[in-house]
Image (cartoon, rainbow, N blue to C red):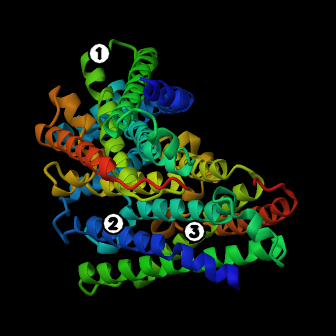
Amino acid sequence: MNVFRQEFKMNFKTALLWILVLCTLGLIFMSFLPLVQKDMKTFLKLMDNFPPALKAVMGIVTGTFSTPLGYYSFAFAFVTLCGAIQAMNLGVGIVSKETRDKTADFLLTKPISRTGILSAKISASIVLLAMTAIVYSVIMGFIIRSFSSGDIDIEKYLLVSVTLLFSQVIFYSIGLLVSVAARKIKAVLPVSLSIVFFFYALSAFAVTSESDKLRFLTPFQYFKPVYIIANGSYETAYLVTGIGIVIVSVLASYVWFCKKDVHSV
Amino acid sequence: MNIYMRELKAHWKSLLIWCIGMFFLIMAGMGKYSAGAAAGDNSMNQLMKEMPQSLQNLFGVGVFDLTIAVEFFAILYMYILFMAAIHAAMLGSGIISKEERDKTAEFLLVKPVSRRQIMTAKLLAALTLLAVFFLATYASAYGILSYYSKGAAFASDLMKLMASFAAIQLLFLSVGAFFAGIFKNPKRSVAAATSVMMVMYLLAVIADIVEKLDFLKYLSFFKYYDAKDILKRGYSPVYPVISVIVIAALIFCAYHFYQRRDMKI
């Protein structure tokens, strides 16, 4: 419990800062909604001259972007990116910092097993990530409400927003595995940012088709807001892959950490 | 010379990983390209052209002909720039601030070399690393494009894009060096450099979707080298001029402040 409390305290301020970043980001994007909607209306008027079949196809696409929720799902990609950075920083940092700050021997000589240490660290992180996602979702919900004229579909909004936490947990577990596997990580940011941005760039390439093998390679593509809003559910295959990644990396982290030779100097 | 060699040796492994990552990214991205398949009927192309510019940017269509390999590449190009930027920003800030992070600053500064010489050697090493990354990217893009373009000319377009790639690398390297020059805390300088990069990326996205906020493009290095402008809309020489001034100012400040500040020991 002490380890849990210590980790929570140490990372609490950073988490608050990230909540601020995520909400500001969402607010900035939502504040452009009126401008985008205006552009959209001009275009819809222009489309009157086109054949009805084409109009129907384009109408679905433009329709998504002109509703607050549809536009939010576009902005949500950037929120997820920032959330992933937060989670990855936490994951890469939380174990490796003991070696970096030379506190590993202090911690490991305490009457607590390595499994206990790792469990405390993981649960502290999960609580922080969950706190981030919940506070963000609540604040963002109010922001969206204030920008939309009518009601928004709360259930679908929550379905989309809660994927922030899912993505974060996936990235967290990957970061945790990396930090446990590495002998020593000199600095957290270069490692975590490289991994996150690599996945992000990869996800940009994986958007052309729905059933794309490439999508499995990047957690940014596991929860597509467009699909969630259209169907009101998640894509099972990707949800299962995500859970699989989390379970495998957390288990591997436990095994590795318990056997690891931790250098005290 | 010793410092230069030392830095190259310290960085070659991570450089290798970056080069492999870049090759993989370009390959995965271009794997989506299939000549002729994306060609819709004419009315669709016509409709795309009539879209408001913000919408075109939103969907990433309209400007580029996706049936031509090099124009398909131009769509991926934004993310390739993004990777170059993150690499250069972290390298520029890390290569200077890591002495303080690893507590080797004292050791280095008592050697019979001036701070100016240290800075010069480190920046030259960084430039060498950037050059290798540049060549690796160029070679990967060239090889993969020549496979996909099947004889169609692409060399001059690719050269234009890669020239901007180099400019982005230099810009973000100097941003990194600037922050490492002024901030005492090594963690903060890396975080500041990467935050600048993230903010600029978001500004580029916002400038893309909201036509009214077009002036934002002057605040984002990514918009200085927009593939749409370079290949299609005509390129303004204003941007390279701004870039040179910005790089010179940042590097000057990096030298200036690094020579005067206290080291964190």
* CA distance for labels 2 and 3: 18 Å
Task: Please state the horizontal and vertical placement of residue A5, each as a whole percent of the image.
Answer: 47, 24
Q: Secondary structure at mark 2?
A: helix
Q: Quadrant of the C terminus of chain B?
A: bottom right
Whether residue B101 is visible = yes
Specify the amino acid type for callout 1: Ile
Task: Please state the horizontal and vertical placement of residue A190, each as a whole percent of the image.
Answer: 51, 56
Query: Disc 2 vs disc 1: which is toward the camera?
Result: 2
Q: What residue sits right under mark 1 in the picture?
A: A154
Residue, x 50% and y 50% (percent of image)? A99
Q: What residue sits right under mark 3 in the picture?
A: B169
Q: Secondary structure at mark 1?
A: helix
Q: Are marks 2 and 1 on the same chain?
A: no
Q: Nearer the viewer, residue A67 or A134?
A: A134
Residue, x 40% and y 42% (percent of image)? A84
* CA distance for labels 1 and 3: 44 Å
Whether residue A27 is visible = no
Q: Quadrant of the N terminus of chain B?
A: bottom right
Q: What residue sits right under mark 2 in the picture?
A: B25
Specify the amino acid type for callout 2: Leu
